[in-house]
Image: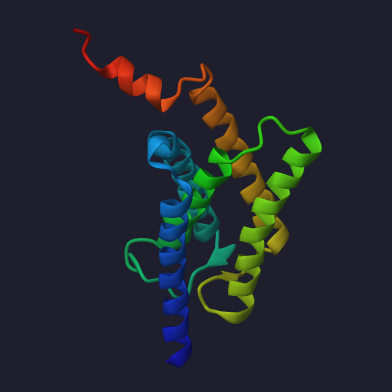
Amino acid sequence: MQNKTVDKTIELSAWTVTILLLIKFVPKRRIREAIIPFFFKQCITWIFGLMVVEKRLISYPIRLFFNRATKSSFTFEYFVYPSLCVLFNLYYPKKSNNVQKLLYYFFHTAIITCFEIYAVKFTKLIKYDKWSWYWSFASIWVTYYLSHIFYQWYFKNGVSNKKMVTSAEPSS
């Protein structure tokens, strides 16, 4: 019983920390810009997460939300990963060299993977059935890459939020 309480506390903490990260690191002027990678990552991780769970590669024995509606983790697939993807894209070092960009991908992917490994070892929030950490690492890396390609494509003209707001106002 106590472990279940600890696991639920960890999941609630993930929500709290993620919300605080978004409040702290997403400036008000870039909220519109943040929504794009958030929704894009939600789409791909939600679909991929459902496939992985339905194929019984991963299971989530303890979940706070939508226990009867889905076997996937709403918290991680639908909120935490997409939120971290927002931070990844907003702070992507586009003017850096390729080695620094590669390290940026590695750092972001490794942080999530390490937290996942911890959750697998010490909690019942996630269980690897026919899965391993390196599949998580690869899939997170690929979804970050896809989200960044989409993000670049969506904002390819370099339109800033300021330009979007002023161009939407009626002219006098």
The x, y position of residue 103, in whole percent, is 75, 46
Could you tell me residue 18's position as x and y percent?
A: 46, 59
Q: In this view, does 62 lie to the left or right of 136?
A: left
Foreground of the two, 159 or 59: 159
Task: Work out which quarter of the rendered image holds the C terminus and state it.
Answer: top left
Placement of 61 over or under 71, stated as above or below: below
Residue farthest along the top direction in this orientation: 172
Q: Is residue 164 above or below residue 119?
A: above
| Quadrant of residue 39 within the rendered picture | top left
Q: Residue pushed farthest left?
A: 172
Percent coordinates x, y for residue 68 in the rendering: 32, 67
Establish if 42 lies above or below 114. above
**Which of the 4 quarters of the picture holds residue 13?**
bottom left
Whether residue 72 appears in this view of the structure is no
Q: How is the rendered protein coloured?
A: rainbow
* Residue ID at (66%, 46%): 141
For this orientation, the residue located farthest to the right is 99
Q: Residue at x 70, y 53 (%)?
A: 107
- Farthest residue, direction front: 172
Q: In which quarter of the image is the N terminus?
A: bottom left
Q: Is 133 on the left or on the right of 99, as rendered?
A: left
Q: For residue 66, what is the image quadrant?
A: bottom left
Which is nearer the eye, 35 or 100?
100
Camera-side residue of 160 and 107: 160
Residue found 34% across the figure and 66% down from its top? 65
Q: How many labels does the image show?
A: 0
Q: In this view, does 115 lie above or below 134?
A: below
Residue 92 at least partly seen: yes
Residue at 39% from the left image edge and 39% from the top image edge: 31
